[in-house]
Each structure stands twice: as C-alpha cells, then as structure tokens.
Image (cartoon, helix red, strand yellow):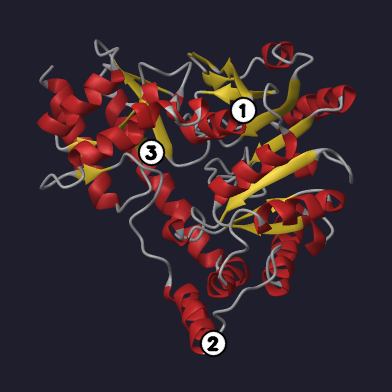
C-alpha cells in the first residue's frame, strides 16, 4: 500500500475499463464469440503487409522523421483531398503511434491541469481517461435517447462551456451509440467555438462507416472539414485501425493547423520519438490503394447491422436505435438495468462477449455495446444466441 500511495494521485484514481474487465474474464472461454472490443476479425490485407515487409527487407529500421515520413504525409494529404475536397497540404499531418496517442498528444497540446474538456457521452472511455491523465477535467454532455434514436441537444452542449473550458471534443460517428452529427450541428459548434476562442478536437475515426446512401451521398459522415476555414482551431484525430484492419499496428495521425506543427513534433519526439518506418510504409499503401477494402468492410458491417437490428427488435424486449454510423449496436434489454451484471450473465449463459454501458460514462449505463464488424456467420450465431436468451427470460 505504501508504494501505491506514493504514486501520482491522478494515475491511481483512473477507472479500470469495464470493457477490458469483461474481456479478461472470458477471453479464453471455449466457444466464446468476442464482440466486446472495437475491431473486426479480418486480418490486415496482404498488400498492406507486403509494403511493411518490403520496408523491413530494404533495411528501413532506423530512426525517422518525427512528424512522419514524407511519403505517408503526402498520401494523407491526397486522401483528404479525395474525400473532403480540401487542398492537399502535407504540413497539416502528423503521424502518431495510434489514434489513442493522437488523442493524448492533442490533449497535452491544449489542456493544462484544471482546464475543462467538454465531451459528448456515452463516449469511448479512453477519451475521458486521457483527459484525466493530463490533469484536465472531463465535462459530460449526454446524448438523448428517444423514439427517434440518439440525438444531441446542441444548446445543452454549449451551456456546458465555462471560463475553464479549453476544447470541445466531438466524436462523430459515435462510439458507442452510432449517432452521427449533421453538418448544421457541426457548423453551430464551430461558430460557437470561434466566438469563444475554443479548440475543437474532432474524432472522425468512423467517418467512412455510414449506411444510408441518401443521408450520406458522399459515402462518409459530415465533417468539420466541410464547414471550417483555414486557421480554424480544429484538431482532427484519426487512426488506420478501423478502415484498413490495422488495430494491432498502432498507427494513427493528427491533422492540425500547420502553425502548431512544432509543438506537435516536440510532443511526438518526447513520447515515442516517431513511428517505425515500416509501419508508415504500410499505412501509406493502405490510404493509397485500400478503397476496395474499405468498401468491403462497410458493406459487411451494413449487412450485419440490419440483421441484428431487425432480429432484436422482433423480440419486443429490446430498446435500440439502428446506428447511422460506426459499427456498434448500443441497446438495452428490458428488465436488466445493470449492464455489467448483464454482460457477465451473457458470458456464462449465452457465450457472447459484450461491453457494458457502464464503461462509457454517463447516459448509457443500462445499455450494452456489441461490435458487429465480424464475419456474418458469427453475427448470425450471436443474434440467435441473444434472441434465444431473451426468449428464456
């Protein structure tokens, strides 16, 4: 206890992840279908792996550019020009050791101890915890859940801003709810942030995972790129993990105004001293040649989403909003308000691993999250197990 008490209080008081706690409890259980974490079951495509192997064979095993190799930064600029119609400027892009590190470094650049970061909940727990690690205070603004699904009261979000607020963190499409911000919502938030001199941290990791062609004719969610001007105080955090099945590679990026580039470079230098070149070669190949793979991933998720939603709603005992984006179903089973206990019960009685809503902070404690980025046969089997279990309640 003396050793524990001698540690930094903020570190000691961090919450254990409820998601990891459930996964650790049942990770090796025979026959378990693990739908608790945010990744699919498809390995990284071979063409991406080949780029990494070639880099290793070429001897690219030395220290490299702290901001990222020029080839990857140019590839990211081209990717954003194609999908967001913004002028390709490699100086906006900074390669990080995962999307998680992109969030950490953005918060380190923006927030001092005692500052406040306003964030929309339910949210991925790492956003909340990363804010705490910096010494800043997470301020939660809950999404509303009703007959029309999940929605954001923008006025409530803006009322949460105080003199201590440094940034508004917006994750859209949302993990875990699947809520997607409209362009008008993003415009309102941006105009308010401009008027107050605030920063926005835009987590658009799931931007490509949208399912309604009429609502999303560009094949992506609305973005702050659509409404911002050059120089606006918006920092984007992103990752190669989801679009290109690279969760284990731990490679991401930040997009930010070039004038803060030296600050971000310094933070990268003093944390990891850069991302391995062979990983960056793989990432560059992904963004240049990975469109067909992304399309396959989205189509697969779309099919799984539709099957899950229709099957669970037919039980008459499930409350859910069919997600507009991302690849999670966040739902509530009648009569089971303790989502952590429910997940433990489903592990034992149905051999399905879900994530409890208690792990996503305020606004969703009675819900559970299911990642449907899996083989359709696994989703069908998971659905059958869930429907059968609900029927035996």
Quadrant location of the N terminus in the rendered image: top left
Sequence-first tag of 2 and 1: 2
**Disc 3 crowd, CA 10 A, few/some/many (<14, 14-19, 20+):** few
Q: How far apart are marks 2 and 1 (CA)?
A: 41 Å
Residue for point 54% across, 72% down = 282
For the point 68% across and 66% down, which residue is it? Answer: 68
Circle 2: is it few (<14), some (14-19), or many (20+) Cα within 10 Å?
few
Of marks 2 and 3, the one in the foreground? 2
126 relative position to 335: left or right? right
Quarter of image, res 116: top right
Q: Which mark is residue 59?
A: 2
Considering depth in this image, is 308 or 264 the residue closer to the camera? 264
What separation in Å lies between label 3 and label 1 (alpha carbons)? 41 Å
Residue 306: give its label.
3
Which of the two labelled residues, at mark 3 and mark 1, occupies the earlier sequence position? Answer: 1
Question: Which dot, 3 or 1, sits closer to the camera?
Answer: 1
Counting from the top left corner in percent of width and height, residue 94 is at 70, 58
Q: Do the residues labelled 2 and 1 touch (CB within 8 Å)?
A: no
Graded by Cα atoms within 10 Å as few (under 14), some (14 to 19) or many (20 or more), the crowding at tag 1 reads some
Which residue is identified by label 1?
135
Is 377 above or below relative to 313? below
Is residue 17 in view from this perspective? no
Which residue is farthest front?
2
> In the displayed structure, does residue 210 sit left or right of residue 385?
right
> Taking 203 as reference, is 251 above or below it?
below
């Amino acid at each position: 206890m003396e050793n524990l008490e001698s540690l930094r209080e903020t570190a000691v008081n961090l919450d254990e992840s409820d998601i990891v706690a459930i996964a650790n409890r049942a990770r090796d259980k025979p026959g378990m279908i693990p739908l608790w974490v945010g990744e699919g079951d498809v390995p990284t495509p071979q063409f991406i792996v080949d780029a990494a192997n070639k880099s290793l064979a070429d001897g690219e095993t030395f220290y490299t550019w702290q901001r990222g190799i020029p080839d990857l930064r140019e590839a990211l600029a081209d990717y954003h020009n194609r999908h967001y119609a913004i002028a390709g400027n490699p100086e906006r892009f900074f390669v990080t050791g995962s999307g998680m590190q992109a969030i950490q470094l953005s918060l380190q650049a923006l927030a001092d101890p005692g500052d406040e970061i306003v964030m929309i909940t339910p949210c991925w727990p790492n956003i909340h915890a990363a804010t705490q690690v910096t010494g800043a205070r997470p301020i939660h603004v809950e999404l509303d859940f009703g007959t029309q699904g999940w929605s954001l009261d923008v006025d409530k979000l803006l009322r949460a801003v105080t003199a201590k607020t440094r940034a508004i963190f917006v994750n859209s499409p949302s993990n875990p709810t699947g809520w997607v911000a409209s362009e008008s919502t993003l415009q309102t938030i941006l105009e308010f942030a401009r008027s107050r001199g605030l920063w926005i941290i835009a987590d658009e990791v799931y931007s490509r995972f949208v399912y309604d062609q009429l609502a999303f004719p560009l094949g992506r969610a609305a973005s702050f790129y659509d409404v911002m001007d050059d120089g606006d105080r918006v920092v984007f955090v992103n990752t190669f993990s989801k679009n290109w099945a690279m969760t284990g590679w731990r490679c991401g990026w930040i997009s930010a105004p070039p004038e803060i580039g030296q600050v971000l470079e310094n933070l990268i230098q003093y944390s990891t001293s850069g991302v391995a070149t062979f990983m960056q070669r793989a990432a560059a190949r992904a963004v240049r040649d990975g469109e067909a793979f992304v399309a396959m991933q989205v189509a697969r998720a779309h099919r799984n989403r539709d099957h899950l939603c229709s099957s669970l709603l037919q039980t008459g005992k499930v409350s859910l909003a069919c997600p507009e984006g991302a690849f999670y179903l966040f739902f509530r089973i009648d009569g089971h308000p303790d989502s952590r206990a429910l997940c433990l019960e489903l592990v034992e009685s149905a051999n399905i691993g879900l994530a409890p809503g208690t792990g996503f902070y305020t606004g969703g404690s009675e819900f559970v999250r299911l990642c449907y980025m899996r083989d359709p046969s696994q989703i069908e089997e998971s659905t059958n197990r869930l429907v059968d279990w609900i029927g035996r309640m």
